[in-house]
Image (cartoon, rainbow, N blue to C red):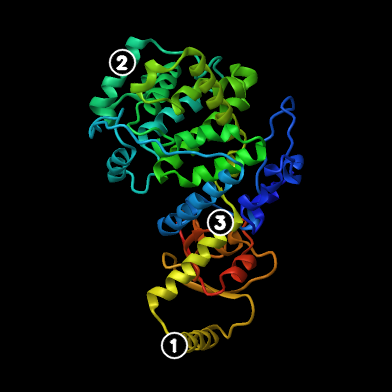
């Protein structure tokens, strides 16, 4: 069943009134999932025009983060859940090595050699080794490596990871180093700011609304944190999909990873009772379980949030231009005349620009089922890199379109945008 709640124009906070009155809403009843049934990882049809956070420009993401924060606060308050931000502890960040180094510092170094990389290379290497050699290994992620060997490997990676011999790294070593990397981040992967809010999601009575809250929280994460979390969850789903061979069920994987993602500050560790510590571990595992199962949803930007980003951009553009009512009318008329002169436009005609191709532009009439890949295929040539179609300008800064996205729907929402093909 498809989660049509991400396609609605109304905010999530408006859909929890039934829960406030102690009743189950229709969405929750439809979303019921038998925990004993076989795992199914549903996906959302790309033709619906939805986007992942990574498809938006940094400017649009800034707007999205602002709106998501307001929506999440309202959503939780409507459910009667109050959260408070914890002040991050003071700690000195390392600027060299691999472990305990801020993500942005690692990415800055990696981008000198690999421009545009979004996940630190060392993290990618560890995941790659585990995918290639560990998915069928019994107890992957659960069985620890020798503490002395891990300490030695850590020292070597910190000293010079560019010259590190990855071929000599065993699966059990890669597993321990991966968890160590996450644990020793100077700022938790889920951030100090939002860690307590993640824990409060467990107080939400409905699994549907828990997923919605996790989705909003994910959109609030910094880009580097979000991209690493995404890569990690994709890998964890692979592990679970091979549970017949590796004996690592969804719950096993979630319990093993919980202490790494939901760790407390070192200063508070001694004051936690063993019982409370176990309860927190189980709670963290429940959240990871939800994120693994519903990861296709939590990266998706709901329709109502993207609509609000478009509205904010529209208002912002008008304010920046500082145009009077008369001059806006004149500008609108001139823009229409220019479009008519260039393409003799009728409804649904667009001009696609491809500056990196020999054929730099093309006028195309959109049909009802025209998709982004239908357009990019017209510009493809032999041995050319993968190209994407972007929606640029109008009421969005820049958005990469999924190959199966239906373009006429995008055109109707943003008729004044430019269409650009690039990697």
Sooner in the amino-acid sequence: mark 3 or mark 1: 3
Task: Tell me, yes or no, if residue 229 can be seen here.
Answer: yes
Which residue corresponds to the image point at 34% horizontal and 35% vertical from the top-left? 88
Task: Tell me, yes or no, if residue 393 can be seen here.
Answer: no
Which residue corresponds to the image point at 41% horizontal and 55% vertical from the top-left? 58
Task: Give the quadrant of the C terminus.
Answer: bottom left
Q: Position of residue 113 (x, y in %)?
A: 29, 43
Q: Position of residue 9 (x, y in %)?
A: 64, 59
Task: Give the quadrant of the N terminus.
Answer: top right
Task: Decide which of 273, 347 is in the foreground and name it.
Answer: 273
Q: Which mark is residue 238?
A: none
Mark 2 touches mark 3? (CB < 8 Å): no
Side of 38 relative to 92 (left or right): right
Mark 3 touches mark 1? (CB < 8 Å): no
Task: Provide the residue designation for mark 3.
Answer: 305
Task: Provide the residue designation for mark 2.
Answer: 151
Crowding at mark 1 (Cα within 10 Å: few <14, some 14-19, many 20+): few
Spatial separation of the CA atoms under disc 2 and disc 3:
45 Å
Q: Which mark is residue 327?
A: 1
Q: How many marks?
A: 3
Seen in the picture, residue 210 relative to 423 is either above or below; the reply is: above
Q: Position of residue 376 (x, y in %)?
A: 55, 62
Q: Nearer the viewer, mark 2 or mark 3?
A: 3
């Amino acid at each position: 069943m498809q989660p049509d709640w991400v396609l609605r124009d109304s905010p999530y906070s408006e859909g929890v009134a039934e829960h406030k009155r102690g009743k189950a809403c229709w969405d929750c009843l439809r979303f019921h999932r038998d925990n004993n049934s076989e795992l199914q990882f549903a996906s959302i049809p790309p033709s619906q025009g939805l986007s992942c956070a990574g498809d938006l420009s940094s400017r649009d993401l800034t707007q999205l983060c602002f709106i998501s924060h307001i929506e999440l606060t309202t959503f939780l308050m409507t459910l009667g859940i109050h959260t408070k931000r914890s002040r991050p502890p003071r700690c000195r960040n390392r600027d060299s090595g691999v472990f305990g180094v801020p993500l942005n510092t690692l990415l800055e170094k990696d981008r000198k050699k690999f421009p545009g990389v979004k996940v630190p290379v060392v993290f990618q290497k560890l995941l790659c080794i585990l995918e290639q050699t560990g998915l069928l290994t019994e107890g992957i992620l659960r069985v620890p490596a020798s503490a002395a060997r891990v300490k030695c490997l850590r020292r070597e990676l910190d000293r010079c990871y560019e010259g590190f011999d990855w071929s000599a790294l065993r699966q059990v070593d890669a597993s321990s180093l991966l968890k160590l990397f996450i644990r020793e981040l100077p700022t938790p992967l889920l951030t100090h700011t939002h860690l307590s809010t993640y824990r409060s999601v467990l107080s939400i009575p409905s699994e549907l609304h828990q997923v919605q809250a996790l989705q909003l929280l994910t959109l609030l994460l910094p880009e580097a944190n979000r991209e690493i979390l995404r890569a990690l969850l994709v890998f964890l789903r692979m592990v679970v999909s091979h549970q017949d061979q590796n004996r690592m069920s969804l719950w096993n994987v979630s319990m093993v990873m919980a202490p790494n993602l939901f760790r407390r500050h070192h200063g508070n560790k001694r004051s936690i009772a063993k019982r409370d510590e176990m309860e927190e571990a189980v709670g963290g595992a429940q959240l990871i379980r939800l994120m693994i199962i519903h990861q296709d949803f939590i990266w998706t930007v709901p329709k109502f949030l993207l609509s609000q980003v478009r509205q904010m951009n529209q208002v912002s553009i008008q304010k920046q231009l500082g145009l009077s009512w008369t001059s806006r009318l004149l500008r609108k008329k001139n823009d229409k005349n220019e479009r008519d002169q260039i393409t003799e436009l009728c409804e649904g005609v667009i001009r696609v620009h491809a500056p990196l191709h020999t054929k730099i532009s093309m006028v195309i009439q959109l049909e009802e089922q025209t998709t982004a890949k239908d357009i990019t295929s017209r510009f493809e040539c032999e041995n050319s890199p993968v190209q994407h179609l972007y929606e640029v300008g109008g009421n969005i800064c820049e958005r990469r379109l999924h190959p199966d996205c239906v373009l006429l729907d995008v055109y109707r929402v943003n008729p004044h945008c430019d269409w650009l093909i690039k990697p």
